[in-house]
Image (cartoon, coloured by chain):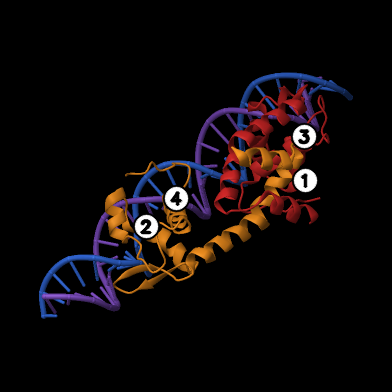
Chain colours: A orange, B red, C purple, D blue
DNA sequence: ATTAGTGTTATACATCACCAGTACACCATA
DNA sequence: TATGGTGTACTGGTGATGTATAACACTAAT
């Protein structure tokens, strides 16, 4: 599988999001290693640095831990940690903005939430 | 009032959004002229080009009409037109993404409606 | 005709983001 | 010691982006 990169967004960010999603959804479990920089680079035809940049973000967020010479490993508790962080971020930043937009457009938050969740 | 520009986003986009909001909220009425490029430039200490770029977007969207030598005027029906467009855009693009995020984070409608409305 | 007001074009410049190539430091294994 | 596996620091190119400067075309009023 060679993903179609969205030209609008930087590849390293898309890679980052991809890993985040996979951890959140449990495809990569805690204690497991991330696929190596060079492996991903070869598979996706990218420069190792690009992957490294994405992986660097995960280290900065302490979601992943480096073991020298061995690779990057998902830290224990990473899944819950990330879920909490994403929720916090969503509730305090994105959602208020969206809500304001909804009000500005004279749409009903209740309708949007209830009607859409069923489908 | 000298607005604090968000360094993250280009000024011309913030100007554009500002005008859009003012038209939507009825502060600038249909048939009225936009403040001139040079006037805004002087007031905000910006280059005329920066304002022109924002105004250009409004012309491209046919929200505003140029009268040579006189200025830019809000077109009749602009307010309703923009409301419709923004709604359409919101419902077909932003909202689906937000909804997906909500599901992914396992957030409940009740939580979203109650928590944020108070602040 | 002159002056002052509109927006715009054309040009150029500084900055930055993204990404590639190379070389390095480290570890594990034999 | 040699080899092959990790991630990364450094450098630099390329392209896009945001803004600045100056000159242009038009209208309106004097």
Q: Which of A78 and A26 is in front in this view?
A: A26
Which dot, 1 or 4, sits closer to the camera?
Answer: 4
Neighbor class of circle 3 (other Cα within 10 Å; few <14, some 14-19, many 20+) is: many
Label 3 sits on residue = B24
**Residue at x 46%, y 57% (from the top left corner):** A20
The answer for how far apart the CA atoms under marks 1 and 4 are is 40 Å
Which dot, 1 or 2, sits closer to the camera?
Answer: 2
Q: Where residue B97 sits in the image (x, y, percent)?
A: 57, 43
Q: Which chain carries label 2?
A: A
Element type at mark 1:
helix
Relative horizontal placement of residue C3, taking residue A16 as reference (left or right): right
| Labels 1 and 3: the sequence-earlier one | 3
Judge whether A54 appears above or below B84 on screen.
Answer: below
Label 2 sits on residue = A51
Q: Which chain carries label 3?
A: B
Q: Do the residues labelled 1 and 2 touch (CB within 8 Å)?
A: no
Judge whether A100 appears above or below C16 on screen.
Answer: above
The answer for how far apart the CA atoms under marks 2 and 3 are is 43 Å
Element type at mark 4:
helix
Judge whether B88 appears above or below A50 on screen.
Answer: above
Query: Same chain for the residues at labels 1 and 2, yes or no?
Result: no
The answer for how far apart the CA atoms under marks 1 and 3 are is 23 Å
Element type at mark 3:
helix
| Labels 2 and 4: the sequence-earlier one | 4
Q: Where residue B58 sits in the image (x, y, percent)?
A: 67, 30
The answer for how far apart the CA atoms under marks 4 and 3 are is 34 Å
Label 1 sits on residue = B43
Label 4 sits on residue = A14
């Amino acid at each position: 599988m060679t993903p179609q990169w969205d030209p609008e967004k930087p590849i390293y960010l898309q890679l980052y999001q991809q890993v985040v999603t996979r951890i959140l959804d449990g495809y990569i479990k805690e204690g497991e290693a991330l696929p190596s920089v060079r492996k991903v680079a070869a598979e996706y035809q990218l420069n190792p640095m690009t992957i490294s940049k994405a992986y660097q973000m995960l280290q900065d967020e302490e979601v992943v831990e480096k073991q020298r010479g061995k690779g990057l490993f998902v830290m224990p508790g990473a899944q819950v940690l990330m879920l909490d962080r994403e929720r916090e971020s969503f509730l305090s930043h994105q959602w208020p903005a969206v809500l304001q937009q909804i009000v500005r457009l004279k749409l009903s938050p209740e309708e949007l939430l209830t009607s859409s969740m069923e489908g």
